Image (cartoon, rainbow, N blue to C red):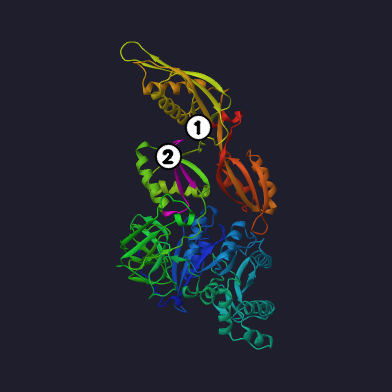
Amino acid sequence: MNRTVASSFSAPGTPAAIRNVVLVGPQGTGKSALVEQLSTGQLGHVRDAEEASAAVGVVSTVHEPTGTVVTLVDTPGRPDFVGEVRAGLRAADAVLFVVAAGSGIDEATRMLWRECDAVGIPRAVAVTQLELARADWDQVVDECRRVLGEAVPVGLPLLEGQSLTGVLDLLEQVAHDASGQTRPLTEDDAARVEEARGGFVEAVIEQSEDEGLLDRYLAGEELDLDGLRADLATAVATARFFPIVPVNPPTGVGVPALLDLIVHAFPSPDRAWLPAVMTPQGGGFGELTADPEGPLVAQVIRTTTDPYVGRLSLVRIFSGTLTADAHLHVSGHLEWVVGHEVEGHPGHDEDDERPGQLSSPVPGGTTPRESAGAGEIVLVTKLSSAGTSDTLSSMDRPALVEPWLLPEPLLPVAIQAARTKDEDKLATALQRLIAEDLTLRLERNAETHQLVLWTLGPAQVDDVLVRLRDRHHVEITTEPVRTSMRETFVRPVSVQGRLVKQSGGHGQYAVVQLEVEPLERGAGFEFVDKVVGGSVPRAYIPSVEKGLRHQLAEGVLAGYPCVDVRVTLTDGKSHSVDSSDMAFQTAAALGLREAANESTVSLLEPVDLVEVVVGDDYVGAVMADLRGRRAQVQGTEPAELEGHTVVRAEVPQHELSRYPIDLRSVSHGSGTFTRSFARYDYLPASLARELTG
């Protein structure tokens, strides 16, 4: 429920007073608990949250000492919801990676880090679970440096037994205790800080490129705290310096120091990277800045349906000011980015869209707003024509924000309503879910007559089924995805097609002599007329071809379209009264069916070209797995990504139905793949009954 609550939340006066941060990391690291501690400011034990949500969650809070509005974007931790993570990255100006000590940095985190590197978004690392027996602070810091780059602690953990009791602040040279208060350093604390602070200060100065500060530091001068804090912000903004902070999300230890880092070191929207913006026609829009007085440019980050308020959109405002009484232009053209029409997200431009209520997400609910300016993330109701990734702009200056990177859904599941009476309800529900989630794709397979939902993984499948059941009250059954096969002739055969019905009245009479022979793969259908002497009247020759084409489309043996065949009409017979167009069509079809049997016809299965990018350590395991899928491995080569290899193979489509799951397992999460149709090839006889039965 989207509940309106009384709140002390006050809107930011300028974009400089805003910090938008997205939290990312694997499930079970404590992201959601950390968001709760950061947003409420009430330290103490909270749920040790398992990130069960499959959607982006957003909450805004005010940092009381500075009046800065901090908006936190909580993302799902499971890899099946990487689409939601990328949406969260678009909403925010900086990223906080949450890493569990002792668990290491998994491959999904490394891949996401590389994506952030590509766009140069500032990052920091929060290390959790230091209280576990297997956790080692020095070890996790070393791994961060090795894997992530210039990752430098700005705080050191204070541990007593298996408990994190405080954090030593290397910037301010104080200790933050368990209650969030600061205290002077003890003698032991001071020794630890002195040992670590030199490397921290040097790294800050190096990345901020403040030569004057470096000279003073080398001369032994005591550095001004405000100046060092400013240089820290500069260093973080370069996206080459990454602070590391120890925290305990369930108890809140370390949270005040982390919140101070967010406020003082992360960039505000007016200093942050902005996405590419163009006109809806693809032309130049002009320079965009986070100016509340500038042209309105905003993007819908996520769309959902609330049972109480209806359609609810999470909107990031990049420029201008959005008001509740605005007349908006809505633009969406995903097809320009992905290269094809995206089902549920057709290209569109709409004028005079009227938003409903604006509100800010705050702890426990929302608080209403009359307007919101550049840099803010707000909730907007009743945007009827605006879907996820669409752009909101003013009608007199329409804009289009480039959509974020979309992962390709590669795990199919065939679904149907458990009850016939729910079929219409299912269609409506699926349309809504696909409009909300860019990573879902729906396919209505005309050959197998299945409704196939393409997803990113089994967790997303489960989430969709739960939403269909709980939100839309539709029970679903699933079944294995059937493969669209083909038939073809494998040897020449001569046959007669005969339709003779003359039992009184107007009869039907047509006889055709056919020669059927296979063609090479991809050749299609070829019809040859070799009739001489008028045994088949010229008027009926097109009828023969029409009947052949219809039967080939229906299949000649197992009900699959028959391809790559040449049929030659060599002779036939007709009747002056009883022959007709339909009679010759039927005779031709009967002839093809007569020619088809297990010795003359074989099944063809679709084969995809698969390109797998995998960590070098797992190439052998991936190739062995592919060979077990009847793949023809074509070769390997180094990938653009260091430490990775590209494996190319042709794999039968039937063998790829669970490949996203199995690849994740054999590659320990380091593998990704793409697939595209290559050709049809002969199905081994031993598998024909299994796939067609």
Across and down, in percent, residue 667 comes to 64, 50
Q: In terms of depth relative to the viewer, which is nearer, 54 or 296? A: 296
On the rendered image, what quadrant is the N terminus found in? Answer: bottom left
Q: Which mark is residue 416?
A: 2
Give, as a single range, the part of the protein colored magenta: 436-454
Across and down, in percent, residue 174 comes to 60, 80
Across and down, in percent, residue 407 comes to 52, 54
Q: Which mark is residue 525?
A: 1
The answer to whether 451 appears left or right of 487 in the picture is left
In the rendered view, tell whether residue 317 sits above or below residue 428.
Answer: below
The answer, for residue 557, to whether it is visible in the render is no
The answer, for residue 15, to whether it is visible in the render is yes
Mark in front: 1 vs 2: 1
Q: Residues within 10 Å of mark 1 (few under 14, many from 20)?
A: some
Q: In terms of depth relative to the viewer, which is nearer, 444 or 364? A: 444
Indicate which disc, 1 or 2, sits on the residue closer to the N terminus.
2
Across and down, in percent, residue 281 comes to 40, 61
**Amino acid type, residue under disc 2 in the picture:** Gln
Q: Residue at x 53, y 30 (%)?
A: 565
Rendered image quadrant of residue 575 = top left
In the rendered view, tell whether residue 359 sits above or below residue 599.
Answer: below
Rendered image quadrant of residue 476 = top left
**Label 2 SS:** strand
Q: Residue at x 30, y 66 (%)?
A: 327
Rendered image quadrant of residue 314 = bottom left
Q: Residue at x 62, y 64 (%)?
A: 131
**Amino acid type, residue under disc 1 in the picture:** Phe
* CA distance for labels 1 and 2: 35 Å
